[in-house]
Amino acid sequence: MSDALRLVPAIAAGLAADPDLWRDFNDICDCGGRLAGTASEKTAFALLRERVRAASPANSGRSIPVPYNGWQAKHATLRLPNGTMAACHPLVRTIATPTDGLTAEVIDLGRGTPEEFAEHASEIEGRIVLVRHELMFAAGTIHRRRKYDMARANGAVGFLIGGPLAGHVVAGSSGRDSGEGIPALGISPETAARLARRPDGWLTVTLTIETDEAPGETETLVYEYPGKTDEWVVLSAHVDGHDLAESAMDNGTGLASVLAVTRALSPEVANWRRGLRVMFFSVEEWALTGSAQYVQSLSGPERNKIALNVNLDSVAGSPSLAALSSGYPGVEPFLLRVAVANGQSLRTVRPLMTNSDHANFAAGGIPAIRLVAGFDDPNAHLRVVLTPADTRDKVAQAELRQATLLTAALIAAACNADAAEAAQWRVR
């Protein structure tokens, strides 16, 4: 069994020495932060098309249009109680403030747990809620969008989130799609500390945010390499990022790895039980919109033909790798056997975490995992994702190759697993 799960030595050797993996990663970073709706995102899609075409000229792929509620931040300021201006960054899809701004008291809820919101429920209405950004890749983390929703539900008029990196603001999505919302800004940890409650009460700040909202459209790129049956294994990564930096870890690493795995495995797939469907999603940072539309478009039989989704998101920045198994315990023994057979360490994390595109597959009844680096490690470089420090220098080439080799092994084994094994993956 171990030999059957081991990546073919020639393929492993090719991936270990593939110079294009590191080239692709750097070229993706050169595109910029790839915020949805920007020229940077379009440049990245063009690059992906070029690289897949070079690997498999006969496969032109297809593009699925993805309409979404477009948004652009034009201007934002945060005036502190002493009249000085603090650095800030509008959260994606935040609403605008009135022209003369929003002035209100700030209530600091610390981390922003449900318990903290409950204890201060009677004090939130009419105030701006301040919470803290958390390591996103950790057990028990509370996502920013959940904190935003709790602030709204309790009558807050604004939302501030303090970032993890000294001297720098934090980016991210508010989670709002359209319609009502509250103004939302990312700020630095130092600014957050200055807004703590004082003995004489809460401090008052003024937010101004100017935005432009209009219908937008991006795409999902799909490349299919059929196997011997009509079943598929989906390998996915998201293209879009944020405009504070290069979005190198999140998700330049995943994109580069998918390209390398596609180059290495696509010539072999015709001889395998299942085909390989390679997918590049966008507006992932906007509440997982691209993958949500795709999964919702699938019929029941089409979903049943997808044996597994392997989603790569932030797969380097730490030498430790984890597979988020999305509430599908049946897939975990398979993942661990493949890792051991290929000489790699892998942690499995079972609770569904709705922090990347795998979540939409899992919610749609399709076994899905997210491969991620640095899970539960507060010292990993992943702690600075969504800040200006998400740059290529945080990624070691050895880490990216390790993740790519494990991904290739998982994909090859999943495409060749027998029906009984695949049936176990659907056990919940």
Image: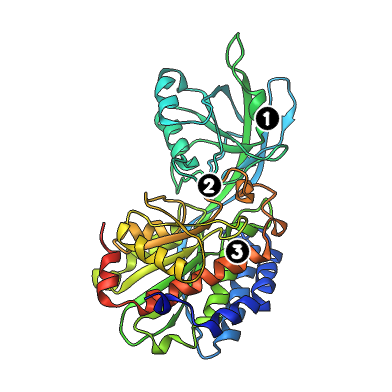
Q: Quick one: label 2, few (<14), some, or many (20+) residues within 10 Å?
A: many
Quick one: label 3 or label 2, which is nearer the N terminus? 2
Image coordinates of residue 175 in percent, x first then y, are 47, 46
Q: Amino acid at mark 1?
A: Thr
Q: Nearer the viewer, residue 14 or 257?
A: 14
Image coordinates of residue 177 in percent, x first then y, are 45, 49
Quick one: label 3 or label 1, which is nearer the N terminus? 1
Q: Quick one: label 3, few (<14), some, or many (20+) residues within 10 Å?
A: many
Tell me: 75 left or right of 344: right
Q: Secondary structure at mark 2?
A: loop
Residue 99, placed above or below residue 352: above
Q: Write the residue at 61% across / 46% down.
A: 383
Q: Secondary structure at mark 3?
A: helix
Depth check, mark 3 against mark 2: the one in front is 3
Q: Secondary structure at mark 1?
A: helix
Where is mark 1, residue-wise? 191
- On-image quarter of the C terminus: bottom left
Where is mark 3, residue-wise? 253
C-alpha span from label 3 to label 1: 31 Å
Q: Quadrant of residue 2?
A: bottom left
Q: How many marks?
A: 3
Quick one: label 2 or label 1, which is nearer the N terminus? 2
- On-image quarter of the N terminus: bottom left
Q: Write the residue at 39% across / 60% down.
A: 292
Q: Nearer the viewer, residue 202 or 16?
A: 16
Depth check, mark 3 against mark 1: the one in front is 3
Q: Amino acid at mark 3?
A: Thr
Q: Amino acid at mark 2?
A: Ser
Q: Nearer the viewer, residue 319 or 364?
A: 319
Image coordinates of residue 96 in percent, x first then y, are 56, 39
Where is mark 2, residue-wise? 173
Q: Quick one: label 1, few (<14), some, or many (20+) residues within 10 Å?
A: many
